[in-house]
Image (cartoon, rainbow, N blue to C red):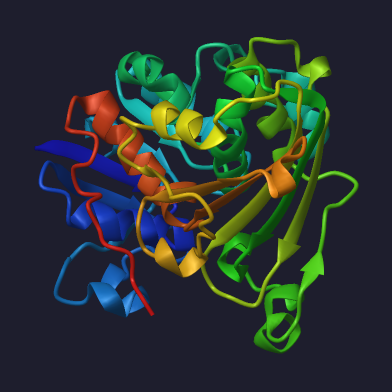
Amino acid sequence: MKKIGIVGGTGYTGAELLRLLLAHPEAEVVTITSRAEQGREVAERYPNLRGITSLRFDSPDEAPLIDCDLVFFATPNGVAMQQVPSLLAKGVRVIDLAADFRLRDAEQWAEWYGQPHQCSELLASAVYGLPEINRQSIKRAQLVANPGCYPTAVQLAFLPLIKHKLVDLQALIADTKSGVSGAGRSANVGTLLCEASENFKAYGVTGHRHLPEIIQGLAQAGQVDIKQIALTFVPHLTPMIRGIHATCYSKLTVTGADLQEMFVQHYLNEPFVDVMPVGSHPETRSVKGSNLCRIAVHQPFQKDTVVVLSVIDNLVKGAAGQAVQNMNIMLGFPEQLGLQVTAVLP
């Protein structure tokens, strides 16, 4: 049994992480932190955990993090970077669910996140935690940067096409939609029921923080410089709680390829990627509460445009579930342990 700590337990991601870990047969959550909720029973904040755990929120300053085998950070951007170096020095392994270690360029990170990076020396050694491309590096990692929700859905859609050099890297489009929980639990007018319900809107069209992360990952997959990737990324807010739907377009540069078979073979041994049959249209509700990404590939009228549909639960494969998947890889557990959850429907 491995001792696990969670820093930042009051947001949707922290709560989902705790829910999954409490059911994990090899993980014991020994501390979960919150300054605002210090001393309060976790089940008071999250009634779904009543009878499941007797944990109370610890102060981040007093939590026994150095006694843990692995610590998750489910905190706002900019928090983990202040505490991670001291934990790594004590031999504690870390998975950060925020964006602190996703980008390798400290200046680029500061540009997109509006603050200087506090430990840029760790960016080169942090492993980007998308298991479908970095599994072997994750096994050895001391510090894993858990991917963002949009980047997970979009990269899994494009990866086979880019890795097999089938598409024009200067003509990539990701038209994405997310449920409101992706905005977090903090009070915000834009995510109030009266604002988000029965409404649909785009945002971040001229630049979203997840854009450089996606480009960095696609460049790695294609083994090219990031300047060779041109991606139009447009996120939308939809009136649902969970789920991401990414419709990804690109132009084929090679004709005659069996795209369906190529996707099937590419993800054949990936436990959390489901390539659906020809003609399928995956739905967000088909992955709700699960760690699955469901994908369907289309080639309209057999022309030179390829359309890949990708759906995930933004709180699971897009956040907490993928973090547990990374934990399993890092600690030598079976990758699916604690994550064999059937999607909730309806």
In the depicted structure, whether residue 277 falls above or below residue 226 = below
Residue 234 position within the rendered picture, expressed as x and y whole percent measured from the top left? 79, 51
Is 221 positioned to the left or the right of 305 in the image? Answer: left
Q: Nearer the viewer, residue 280 or 287?
A: 280
Residue farthest to the bottom, as pictured: 194
Locate the N terminus by quadrant.
Answer: top left
Q: Nearer the viewer, residue 168 or 58?
A: 168
Would you say residue 301 is visible in this rendering? Answer: yes
Is 257 positioned to the left or the right of 68 in the image? Answer: right
In the depicted structure, whether residue 171 falls above or below residue 200 = above
Callout count: 0
Q: Nearer the viewer, residue 196 or 119?
A: 196
Locate the C terminus by quadrant.
Answer: bottom left
In the depicted structure, whether residue 183 falls above or below residue 43 = above
Q: Residue at x 55, y 41 (%)?
A: 152
Residue 100 position within the rendered picture, expressed as x and y whole percent measured from the top left? 60, 33
In the depicted structure, whether residue 195 falls above or below residue 318 = below
Residue 57 position within the rendered picture, expressed as x and y whole percent measured from the top left? 32, 60
Residue 94 position within the rendered picture, expressed as x and y whole percent measured from the top left? 38, 30
Is 311 positioned to the left or the right of 268 in the image? Answer: right
Q: Residue at x 20, y 48 (%)?
A: 338
Q: Residue at x 53, y 63 (%)?
A: 243
Would you say residue 63 is visible in this rendering? Answer: no
